[in-house]
Image: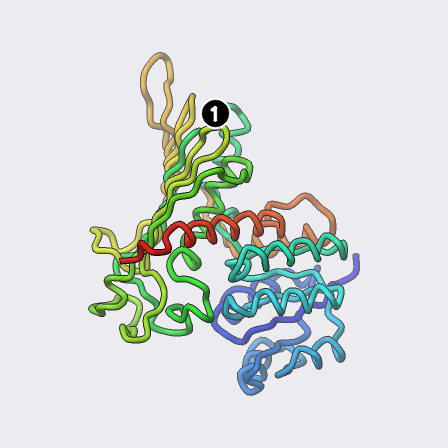
Amino acid sequence: MSILKAAIIGGGNIADKNHIPALKQLSDQVAVVAVCSRDLGKARALADKHDIPHAFAHTAELYRQCAPDVVVICTPNYLHYPQTMEALAHNCHVFCEKPPAITAQNAREMADLAVEKGLTLAYNLQLRQTSEWALLMRCKADGLLGDIYHIKANFLRRRGIPGWGHFTDKAMQGGGALMDLGVHVLDLALCALDYPTPDQVLGNTYDLIGKAGGKGLMGSWDPAKFGVEDAGTAYLSFPNKASIMLSASFALNAQSDRNRNLEIFGSKGGVNLFPFTLHTELAGELADVQFPYLEEVDIQLKNTAAFLDACQGKPSTVCTGAQGAILQEIVGRIYQSAEGTTL
């Protein structure tokens, strides 16, 4: 098997701490040959830190000089669409940070071009790689849950508005807590239902804390420049009457600093995902079954490996371009439903 050449677009923390280390651990499959950032000094510093030979300020030079096989996109959300389309046009497989894009139309065009070119487009939604999720999929396959008909999906922070980067800039990010956090648990909920499209979407968004300011647990932010939702909720209903209740927040006056979880309800059993508990009947009695020995795994490493499997035509658990388009469409419908209701 030939070694794939990978290029990183974006010189920030997610490239430095997540993607490059994972790719380096998979050196039998891929070699990182370049970093590209609009700030050449930033690109060069990141390349030097990780012993990557090339650094560029312009993608045109990257493609001309390095001709990568794989491009990993680690830039703000508004750049995902143009940079993915450019990479696909240069016949590169693409591993893009979440969310897929700013709009559903963009995400659909990205997915369609990948199919047209016969290339892999995937998104870095790493919670699919947790041991808890793998166990849920086994329980589902074994019939322990029966028909799943309702899911509560939460990714909540009490005061976790990021005090760095562009997370509160709507023009660059497209949205706030739903775009950054909600997509992770919404992706899992949709996976549990085999990724259907809802026939009804009702959503609300809020920005009361973000615009008022206050104590933060992830740095300080400027309330005057806060342009996204600090919290969002949605109810999704599907043609088979299954439903999802989604909640996501950067800031919410709640008890826990952080609450990331799925509660899954089926006709034979239910699951609390984090920590994993199976709610069922055993020997004619109600039972809660816990799994205290689940392996802790490097979910970024596993998701990167799953992406490379997809590039090589192997079975993979990575979020596909087609699934990303459905995900982005639903997020867009939540925002459309919430228009005029933001408090």
> Farthest residue toward the bottom?
41
Left or right of 71, for residue 130: left
Position of residue 159 in the picture relative to residue 61 (left or right): left
- Of all residues shown, which one is farthest toward the right? 1
Query: Could you tell me which quadrant the C terminus lies in?
Result: bottom left
Asked if residue 156 is positioned above or below residue 131 in the image, the reply reads: below
Foreground of the two, 38 or 330: 330
Q: In this image, 215 relative to 114: left or right?
A: left
- Residue 47 lies in what quarter of the image? bottom right
Using the rendered image of the protein, determine whether residue 291 is visible from the camera's viewpoint: no
Instruction: Please name the residue shown 37% across and 23% down the image.
Output: 280
Image quadrant where residue 53 sits: bottom right
Q: Secondary structure at mark 1?
A: loop
Q: Position of residue 304 (x, y in %)?
A: 60, 57
Q: Residue 272 vs residue 317: left or right?
A: left
Counting the numbered discs, the total is 1
Q: Position of residue 23 (x, y in %)?
A: 61, 63
Q: Residues within 10 Å of mark 1 (few under 14, many from 20)?
A: some
Residue drawn at (57%, 66%), measured in percent from left and top?
80
Tell me where residue 65 appears, x and y as whole percent. Answer: 75, 80
Q: How is the image coloured?
A: rainbow
Judging by the rendered image, the residue that carries numbered circle 1 is 147
- The quarter of the image holding the N terminus is bottom right
Q: Residue at x 48, y 25 (%)?
A: 147
For the residue marked with disc 1, what is the amino acid?
Asp
Seen from this angle, which residue lies furthest top? 284
Q: Which of the pair 247/277 is nearer the observer?
A: 247
In the image, what residue occupies the spot 75% across and 54% down? Answer: 116
- Image position, residue 244 (x, y; %): 41, 38
Q: Where on the picture, by quarter, is residue 285?
A: top left
